[in-house]
Image (cartoon, rainbow, N blue to C red):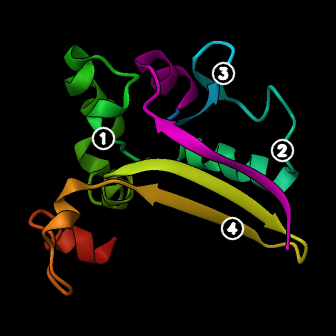
């Protein structure tokens, strides 16, 4: 059985200021029925989650995961800045997995179990998957950086 749960939490791109000052690559949010909008979830500011779930949330916020542009946080005119902040040429090969994990990522849910395990569930929406056949590679994910990440 599950001991604690968090989510599903929506994924959002952080602001440029948060990317630069805090080293954030993704923010987690949840629907706030009072505000009728999504509110950012910061486990260090509101300690309602178990320690393993809070640690996983913080780790994911700082991993170089590149979310889709339409997930908010960065204005269109910041897109070039986003690429420069997140993927300088020297880090491009080492962070290729972050582009792959981030593409289509929409929500994350966390579960800690009675046996001390932590389950992290990633939910995706990717229009390209509607036409892909079993065993077929996606057009831009068949190069050496995809296979080695």
Circles 4, 1 touching at the beta carbon (< 8 Å)? no
Classify 40 as above or below 132. above
Label 3 packing within 10 angstroms: few (<14), some (14-19), many (20+) = few
For marks 4 and 1, the one nearer the N-term is 1
Report, in whole angstroms, how far the alpha carbon at label 2 lies from the one at label 1. 27 Å
Circles 2, 1 touching at the beta carbon (< 8 Å)? no
For marks 1 and 3, the one nearer the N-term is 3
Stretch in magenta: 1-23
Report, in whole angstroms, how far the alpha carbon at label 4 lies from the one at label 2. 14 Å
Report, in whole angstroms, how far the alpha carbon at label 3 lies from the one at label 4. 27 Å
Q: Which of the 4 quarters of the picture holds residue 30?
A: top right
Q: Is residue 77 magenta?
A: no
Query: Where does residue 3 sit, x and y in percent of width and height?
Result: 89, 63
For marks 2 and 1, the one nearer the N-term is 2
Mark drawn on residue 119: 4
Q: Quadrant of the N terminus?
A: bottom right
**In the picture provided, is 121 more to the left or to the right than 1?**
left
Residue pointed to by mark 3: 33
- Disc 2 element: loop
Q: Quadrant of the C terminus?
A: bottom left
Mark drawn on residue 49: 2
Query: Where does residue 120 sit, x and y in percent of width and height?
Result: 63, 62
The residue positioned farthest toward the bottom in the image shown: 135
Classify 5 as above or below 145. above
Residue pointed to by mark 1: 68
């Amino acid at each position: 059985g599950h001991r604690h749960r968090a989510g599903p939490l929506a994924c959002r791109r952080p602001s440029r200021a948060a990317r630069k000052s805090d080293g954030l690559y993704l923010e987690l949010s949840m629907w706030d029925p009072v505000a009728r909008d999504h509110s950012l979830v910061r486990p260090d500011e509101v300690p309602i989650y178990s320690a393993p779930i809070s640690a996983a949330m913080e780790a994911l916020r700082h991993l170089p995961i590149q979310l889709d542009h339409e997930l908010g946080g960065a204005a269109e005119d910041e897109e070039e800045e986003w690429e420069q902040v997140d993927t300088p040429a020297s880090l491009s090969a080492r962070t290729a997995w972050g582009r792959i994990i981030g593409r289509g990522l929409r929500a994350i849910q966390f579960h800690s179990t009675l046996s001390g395990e932590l389950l992290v569930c990633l939910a995706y929406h990717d229009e390209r998957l509607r036409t892909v056949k079993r065993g077929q590679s996606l057009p831009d994910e068949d190069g050496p950086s995809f296979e080695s990440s």
